[in-house]
């Protein structure tokens, strides 16, 4: 199912990554690879839990300065279509538990492209205020940076 775009609630970003879809998928599915690109450098990412299955947890921590790690994302996978699509939300935590502060649901799609993989992120919010806050927090710079880091990892 493809979620329709609602410009009042959603943010989207896409890029062609010059690598096979299987390589991009592997960078999402392997926690050690995921840690290398998920958070904009120079910050560091630690995967606490990654159960790539519907209901599975996606928990990451961030170290801004190379010191102690702090919570970053506590989410739940909603759908996992191997090699093609990942849907996750922070409205739930692993095991379908309701989260305290829901903010977004993200749909990541991977499609074959003549030059590699068409990578797209469609991020949905519960309100226009949340959408605008996410945009003002630097959605395009942040998500664009990590997609660039992902591309560097898999295009190498």
Image (spheres, helix red, strand yellow):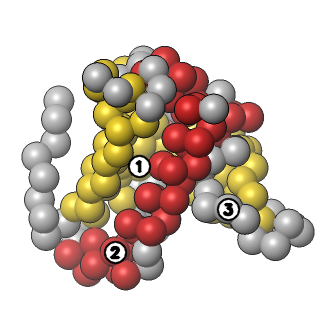
Q: Residue at x 62, y 47 (%)?
A: 37
Q: Is residue 104 left or right of residue 31?
A: left
Q: Quadrant of the N terminus?
A: top left
Front position among marks 3 and 2? 3
Front position among marks 3 and 1? 3
Q: CA distance from mark 3 to mark 2?
A: 19 Å
At numbered mark 1, what does the secondary structure look like: helix, strand or loop?
strand
| Residue 125 seen in render | yes
Which residue is identified by label 3? 41
Residue in the foreground of this view, choosing between 19 and 84: 19
Which residue is identified by label 2? 135
Q: Residues within 10 Å of mark 2 (few under 14, many from 20)?
A: some
Q: Provide residue 106's location: percent of width, then percent of height.
A: 36, 48
Q: Residues within 10 Å of mark 3 (few under 14, many from 20)?
A: some
Q: Residues within 10 Å of mark 1 (few under 14, many from 20)?
A: many
Q: State which tag comes first along the sequence, 1 or 2.
A: 1
Which residue is identified by label 1? 89
């Amino acid at each position: 199912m493809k979620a329709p775009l609602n410009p009042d609630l959603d943010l989207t970003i896409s890029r062609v990554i010059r690598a096979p879809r299987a390589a991009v998928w592997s960078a999402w599915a392997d926690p050690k690879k995921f840690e290398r690109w998920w958070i904009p450098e120079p910050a560091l990412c630690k995967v606490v839990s990654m159960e790539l299955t519907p209901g599975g947890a996606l928990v990451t921590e961030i170290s801004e300065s190379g010191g102690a790690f702090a919570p970053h994302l506590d989410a739940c996978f909603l759908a996992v279509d191997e090699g093609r699509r990942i849907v996750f939300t922070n409205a739930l935590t692993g095991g379908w538990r309701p989260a305290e502060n829901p903010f977004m649901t993200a749909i990541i799609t991977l499609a074959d492209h003549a030059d590699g993989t068409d990578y797209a992120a469609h991020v949905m919010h519960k309100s226009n205020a949340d959408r605008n806050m996410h945009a003002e927090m630097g959605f395009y710079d942040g998500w664009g940076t990590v997609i660039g880091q992902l591309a560097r990892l898999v295009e190498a």
